[in-house]
Amino acid sequence: MTVRQAANVLDLLEFFARRGQPATLAEVSAAFGWPRSSTFNILTTLAERGFLYEPRPRAGYYPSPRWMALAQQIAAAEPLPDFARPLIETLSDETGETAAIVAPAGTQTVFLDVVESPASIRYFAQAGHRLPIHASSSGRAILAQCPKKERLALYRRIDFQRHSDTTPLTPDDVETKLAEEMARGWHSSFAEFSPDLAGVALPLPVGERRLSIVIAGPMFRMQDRMAEIAAMVSDAVRTMAIG
């Protein structure tokens, strides 16, 4: 279920990130098709709370540094382990593909940190990127860390949509894939959600946190290297965690 008022605020933040400059009430209203009265209420509320400011008179609104200050405080309270960033940097360099640390977010996963492949054809992603938890290798590497009772409760909240011929469409489909992948020791996906993209993921448990690490790239480069990449990830995780 989406709460529209909350979604509007988040959409507004993404709008400013893309735009990279202030916007007037009229420009925001036109960009989203919002009524001017609703746009006025959102902008003035955020401005009164210090989340928007006016860099120049009558030039429009822009997000204030308060967002960053809060984000830094939040991140400092729940940091990734020290080895996380070097780990994905190493794996991206060794595999030539995009590497990321992933966490659960309801029925989705969210990328916490990403190192993109240097290749011109690559998996484009950044922190905050989301994927369905059931239809991605990174998601199933997280589901594998959950008790089955917890997984079954989560499945009841998932909207099982077909994104491709390989998308799991039922809880039984997901459980079958999980069983196969857990027996093999690593998780994989082939265009389950994103066309022509493949992924290899392993669990990355850190204390009580359920994280995963994924290597993702175009299928034409990944498909013959899945086991090799999985072994590289497993070795790197073990080495970094111990070191």
Image (tube, grey):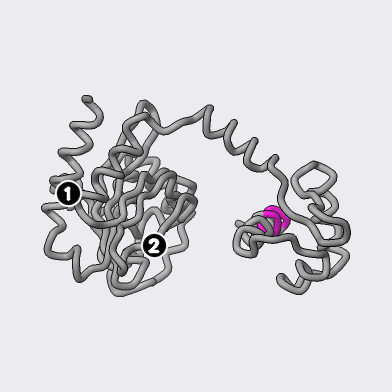
Q: Earlier in the sequence, mark 1 or mark 2?
A: 2
> What residue is rendered at 77% in x and 49% in y?
52
> What residue is rendered at 79% in x and 49% in y?
53
On the image, the x and y values in percent for residue 104 come to 43, 45
State the mark number for residue 124. 2
* SS category of the residue bearing label 1: helix
User: Mark 1, residues whose alpha carbon is within 10 Å: few (<14), some, or many (≥20)?
Assistant: many
Does the stretch in magenta take in 37?
no
Give the left or right position of residue 69, taking residue 224 as reference. Answer: right
Residue 43, placed above or below residue 50: below
Report the amino acid beneath label 1: Ala
Nearest to the observer: residue 120 or residue 155:
120
Report the amino acid beneath label 2: Phe
Nearest to the observer: residue 175 or residue 106:
106
Q: Which residues are magenta?
A: 5-9
Q: Which residue is mark 1?
A: 230
